[in-house]
Amino acid sequence: MQKKKAAIFAISTKIIQFAVSKTNNHMKVPPYLKKRDKIAIVAPAGRVNKDLSEAVKIFESWGLEVVIGESVRSSYHQFAGDDRLRINDFQRMLNDESVKAIIAARGGYGTVRIIDELDFSDFKNNPKWIVGYSDITALHGHIQAQFGIPTIHGQMPWTISDATDLSLETLRKALFGEEIDYQYSSCSTNVSGYAEGILTGGNLALLVNIAGSVSEPDYKGKVLFIEDVSEYYYSIDRMMRMLKRAGRLKDIRALIVGGFTSLKDGDPSFGFTALEIIMDVIKEYSYPVATDFPAGHIDNNQSLIFGKKVSLDIKKKNVHLKYL
């Protein structure tokens, strides 16, 4: 009887190990860049009425060849060309095997208008790095939800002229597969603790925008990063409470709060800061919380690789995030 139980246990263990192996192997990490690789700049959202030559020169200084998509030179109302033009331009770069990374020229609004028309068949078999933040959260979420392929939340050509050297260096390291280590001291109060999990998230407004859709990432067991810009304080409160009521905040492993910048108040005043709102919404949960993380709509927007496992170690105001 004991031998039979042992045999059953051994078989069960092998089945579990096989299942875990299949799950882990499902995630394809795009090949890291090397010198002379080709990257593309496209604009899936807002119109690009700015010279991007400085960004191109920086990418070229990294040894990369840069191609500019048609959408970067196009306009249609507030968009970088109409929806069909932006779809075709992004699709062309997705399917071009010589293009090893696609960098969104800017955010704004418009990615969610085209995402359901994009065909990721070639991409999921031969992934490449997708880079951007803000409105590009829709792409990050969609790729995490559908394919589990890592993407990069980082500086875009639109913001590179104001970017810190450190933020650009983290983008280069992320693209070229070099180690990135984040250690800093928060000005605000953290919730101390240690957690491990897949990193996900992005712009809070966009996370709410894609909630309940095929583009929404699974929050359970994740380390969630959030940031936002130019929102009213009451809107931050409304969006955080929506995520909580939808059950998105209760089962995460940890929360990372990035930049909440250029926020607006009403008359009368809402009465609470963004961080006070966030901490009040999650006060019943016991997971660690890192505040003042250097990412978001800030000059020092350091790159984060969504879809990769991280460890987050918080001791009072000291924060250490690293990839595992």
Image (cartoon, rainbow, N blue to C red):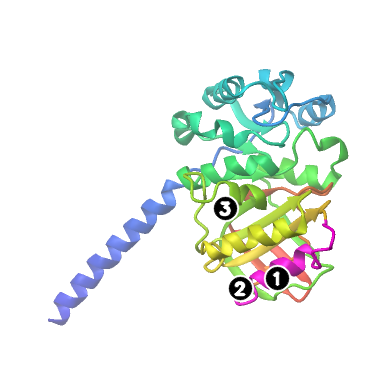
Q: Nearer the viewer, residue 35 or 307?
A: 307
List the single residue furthest toward the left.
1
Badge 1 amino acid: Met
Badge 3 amino acid: Lys
- At label 2, counting other C-alpha atoms closer than 10 Å, the crowd grade (few under 14, some 14-19, many 20 or more) is some
User: Marks 2 and 1, how far apart in space?
Assistant: 12 Å
Residue under the point 28% across and 62% down: 14
Of the two numbered discs 1 and 3 in the rendering, the one whose residue sits closer to the viewer: 1
Q: Which mark is residue 308?
A: 3
Confirm or deny contact between disc 2 and disc 1 (CB under 8 A).
no
Residue 214 as seen in the image, left or right of residue 7: right
For the stretch drawn in magenta, the main secondary structure is loop
Residue under the point 71% across and 61% down: 257
Residue 188: quarter of image:
bottom right
Asked if 321 appears above or below 68 in the picture, the reply is below
In the structure shown, which secondary structural element does the residue marked by tag 2 occupy? loop
Q: Which residues are magenta?
A: 265-285
Confirm or deny contact between disc 1 and disc 3 (CB under 8 A).
no
Earlier residue among tags 2 and 1: 1
Check disc 1 and report the residue beneath it: 279
Earlier residue among tags 1 and 3: 1
- At label 1, counting other C-alpha atoms closer than 10 Å, the crowd grade (few under 14, some 14-19, many 20 or more) is some
Check disc 2 and report the residue beneath it: 287
Residue 223: quarter of image:
bottom right
Measured as percent of width and height from the top left, residue 225 is found at 65, 57
Q: In the image, is residue 197 part of the stretch drawn in magenta?
A: no
Measured as percent of width and height from the top left, residue 20 is found at 38, 58
Asked if 104 appears above or below 197 in the picture, the reply is above
Residue 47 as seen in the image, left or right of residue 143: right
